[in-house]
Amino acid sequence: MKTIKEKHSLLMRWTHWVNFPILTIMIWSGMLIYWASDTYSITLFGHTYFKFFPQGFYKTFNIPKRLSEGMAFHFLFMWAFALNGVVYVLYTIISGAWRELVPQRKSFKEAWQVLLHDLHIRKMAPPQNKYNAAQRIAYTAIILMGFGSLVTGLAIYKPVQFSTVVWLCGGYHFARILHFALTIGYVFFFLIHIIQVILAGWNNFRSVISGFEVVNSAPKKLTVPAEDGK
Amino acid sequence: MENKAKPKKELTIEQKINRRNFISFGVFGVMGAAAWKGWSWLYNAPKETASATAGARLPLRRALNKTELAFRNFFSNNHLVKTYPKEMAAKNVKVNSFIGLKSKFEIADWRLQVVKQSGEVLSFTIDQIKALPKTEIIYDFKCVEGWDQIQHWGGLKVIDFIEHFGLAEETKAAYVGMMTPDKVYQVGLDMPSALHPQTILAYEMNGQPIPINHGAPLRLIIPVKYGIKNIKRIGSITFSNTRPPDYWARAGYDYYSGL
């Protein structure tokens, strides 16, 4: 028999989908800004493996020479990004939804088992509630990353007025590197997230829009306990 | 009347599922379309009409100005830019722009023109400025492009200049405007930033007179702003209650550009 199982709250769904276009705009406008001083690369022992970013990438996305435009978009949508994040975090704390989200002590061990299971190396996945251990870690990490983007962003945006924040971020240079690295982190999160959502299927995806999953439960057979089992 | 009597039939699970899906996906679709509409409105919004600022989409310029007001609340003369020991200052100081420095210029004929709000024009020689107490600063110069460099500058604090030459009355205005002698490069500064204790009229770089490509004989060093506000070769200073012209704000950049 089909039953409706509530999964995601209305507020969680709204903030999730509101965040999607905002973060997209923040990443895009951030690119427009980064282009003006695109100094980062992955270099090990004098050999550069990757330069952020190759000319072809800039051309494809029409990034060059749009610094002022990038800043104007970035410094408007930063408010939306921050506000949406604050609403979500406050809700998650107050509603108690954090209990299903924050990693537990066993999560770190279990996340490994989830990974092995997802890679078809291990047969059984550990039992879970709303989120499995890997999800708990990933979704909590992404919230912390969002907070990190706000803090490092503030540090490079107003380094004189908020010099303490700059100090906390390890200086102006390092704050800019962190701000950039977090953005790369979002892109990787997004890729894995999309793959996982596709693999998880329609029922799971729908729950982030409709809020519920449909559970097919076979009617329970009556089992007569041998003795009066309390 | 008859309706009332009819007992409402409870929805089946299937109906419940369909109903909730219909509402949720309907709202999702409508909001998605609205978001896309909103974005294309913003992206294709007309440019602002040119004034002290120009070149930005009108709604984004409004947002920049509002954001300026929000962050002005955090500005304080007690918030100082971090300073460094002299040894850390770059020997090879970056030159990023020659705008305003390309016209014919005789350094010997240079005078600093200060235009009071009454219209009275005062004129100063570099020696008059050098005669006053010198302030040195070694700090991290920050460019709007994203690079920064520790640099060593020396000169006269703007606030000292104002007080010594009896210009205190002018600081009641909201803005200070500065221009190169050829008027090609201009900056507009809000008064609090202009009077910040680390804002200086610089005539020395690394302990030597400023080279011509860095803005000889006198340039602005204003650590509470991005490099674009650090005008080289100051020709004139004005005071006003409306925003004075500003080269980069007219090219779509934030007028405040404060750090």
Image: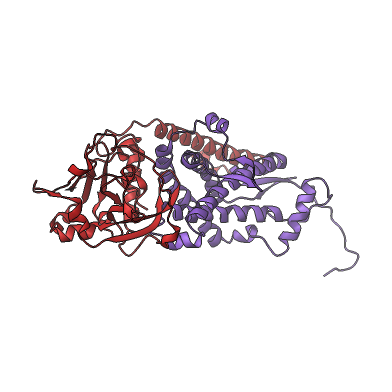
Decide: is B21 above or below B170: above
Name the residue located 76 percent from the left edge and 50 percent from the top edge: A115
Q: Can residue A189 be seen in this view?
A: no
Q: In this view, does A212 lie to the left or right of B99?
A: right
Q: Position of residue B144 (x, y in %)?
A: 40, 45
Q: Can residue B123 be seen in this view?
A: yes
Q: Where is residue A98 in the image (x, y as percent from the top left)?
A: 60, 60
Near-viewer residue (A147 or B79): B79
Q: Position of residue A94 (x, y in %)?
A: 53, 62
Classify residue A68 by image quadrant.
Answer: top left
Q: Which residue lies furthest to the bottom in this view?
A: A230
Near-viewer residue (A26 or A43): A43
Q: Where is residue B45 in the image (x, y as percent from the top left)?
A: 37, 32
Classify residue A227 by image quadrant.
Answer: bottom right
Which chain is assigned red?
A: B
Colour chain A is painted in: purple
Disc tally is: 0
Decide: is A35 above or below B152: above
Q: Is residue A158 left or right of residue B112?
A: right
Q: How has the structure been colored for display?
A: by chain
Q: In this view, does A191 lie to the left or right of A19?
A: right
Q: Residue furthest right?
A: A226
Near-viewer residue (B154 or A194): B154
Q: In this view, does B158 lie to the left or right of A131?
A: left
Near-viewer residue (B234 or B32): B234
